[in-house]
Image (cartoon, rainbow, N blue to C red):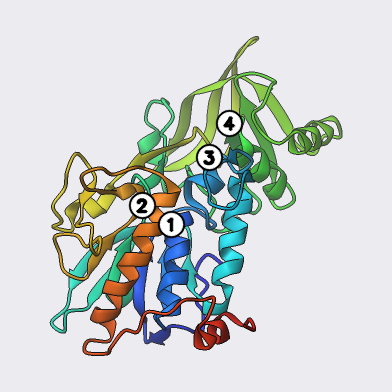
Amino acid sequence: MDSSARSSGEAPVGDVTRTDVLIVGAGPVGLFAVFELGLLDLKCHLIDILDRPGGQCAELYPEKPIYDIPAWPIISAQELVDKLMEQIAPFKPGFTFNRMVSSLEKLEDGSFRVITDENEVFEAKVVVIAAGGGSFQPKRPPIPGIEAYEGESVFYSVRRMEDFRDQDLLIVGGGDSALDWTLNLQPIAKNVTLVHRRPEFRAAPDSVNKMFAMQETGQLRFQVGQVTGLTGEGGKLQSATVKSPDGDVETPCTRLLPFFGLTMKLGPIADWGLNLHENVIPVDTEKFETSVPGIFAIGDINWYPGKLKLILSGFHEAALMAQAAKHYVAPGERIIFQYTTSSTSLQKKLGVTG
């Protein structure tokens, strides 16, 4: 999916994308919010720091079984995400991936202007924070001086594959991200070296087998060890020192992709002027609205007495939030509560017959 894909539900105006509701976070709760808001004719756009929908489910444990989703005795995390994407398809939400929301401003008309770390501008009547425990941010490896190369030669995600074309690429890690990008970037990179501290991996066996097969044919290089130093000038890498069982190895590289996992941080949301409680956002239990009118928080990011950090709870919160959000987008419009099982108008929106 394109990292900045926009659906017909939004209205790009110049460099501004306008939508009814902007959702920060595309995990299960954020995705289900699209469904509840869509039933009320509210158009949504979602922004997520990851490169695909699903949040923690897709990034950390896609194959892990979940046992407490109603009507599903067992469902994998990725299957749940896939089902939610199927469920919201009739509402044609827009998605912007590989982006972090960097700032938020309330406009004179009461709507919000949100800007991403790539200076993309969105405006919406309502903002919904569904960012789990916060935004996923990559863990920086303990390599001296790595900060000087970040954004120039060192990257923690792949936003544009073309940035790695004809480069001497060094990838560090032993999970799915490291193996996937080793395989995907090998055809366009000048050289690819994968470094991991041991020859065993946490990645999908098929990916591991493909990597070793390509190593045997000389298409890429695998090195057991750890990166302990970097050499270069002006942010431009020239080589990396790899500490291997046989001693230090100087490995030429112009691009470094370290995949050391992700950590959760509240990030720029902490600077939005919201009341905070131990790094989460207090909300009421009627609307799940924050201390700022028009900004809601649902899922693991919020807090209220008796809060349970369950996907199930987030779904409930999304349903009540949507009813309140409608009043901001269409003030004065009467909301008639309807059941999808009996409402022909809702069934028409969903593209099903009664």
Q: Report x, y in % for residue 9.
A: 47, 83
The kind of residue on which mark 4 rests is Gly
Q: Which residue is mark 1?
A: 29
The kind of residue on which mark 3 rests is Leu
* Residue at image point 71% right, 28% down: 222
Splitting the image into 4 quarters, where does residue 335 fall?
Answer: bottom left
Per the model, the C-alpha gap separating discs 4 and 2 is 30 Å
Q: Which residue is mark 2?
A: 299
Per the model, the C-alpha gap separating discs 2 and 1 is 6 Å
Q: Report x, y in % for residue 263.
A: 39, 37
Q: Which residue is mark 4?
A: 173
* Identity of the residue furthest to the top in this view: 246
The kind of residue on which mark 2 rests is Gly
Is residue 28 left or right of 319 when viewed as pictured?
Answer: right
Q: Which residue is mark 3?
A: 60
Tell me if label 2 and label 1 are in contact, CB under 8 Å.
Answer: yes
Quadrant location of the N terminus in the rendered image = bottom right
Whether 199 is drawn above or below 328: the answer is: above
* Residue at image point 65% right, 9% down: 246
Q: Earlier in the sequence, mark 1 or mark 4?
A: 1
Splitting the image into 4 quarters, where does residue 201 fall?
Answer: top right
Per the model, the C-alpha gap separating discs 1 and 4 is 30 Å
Q: Earlier in the sequence, mark 2 or mark 1?
A: 1
Mark 4, Cα crowd under 10 Å, few <14 / some 14-19 / many 20+, is many
Per the model, the C-alpha gap separating discs 2 and 3 is 17 Å
Which type of secondary structure does the marked residue at label 2 adopt? helix
Q: Earlier in the sequence, mark 3 or mark 1?
A: 1
Which type of secondary structure does the marked residue at label 1 adopt? helix
Q: Earlier in the sequence, mark 4 or mark 2?
A: 4
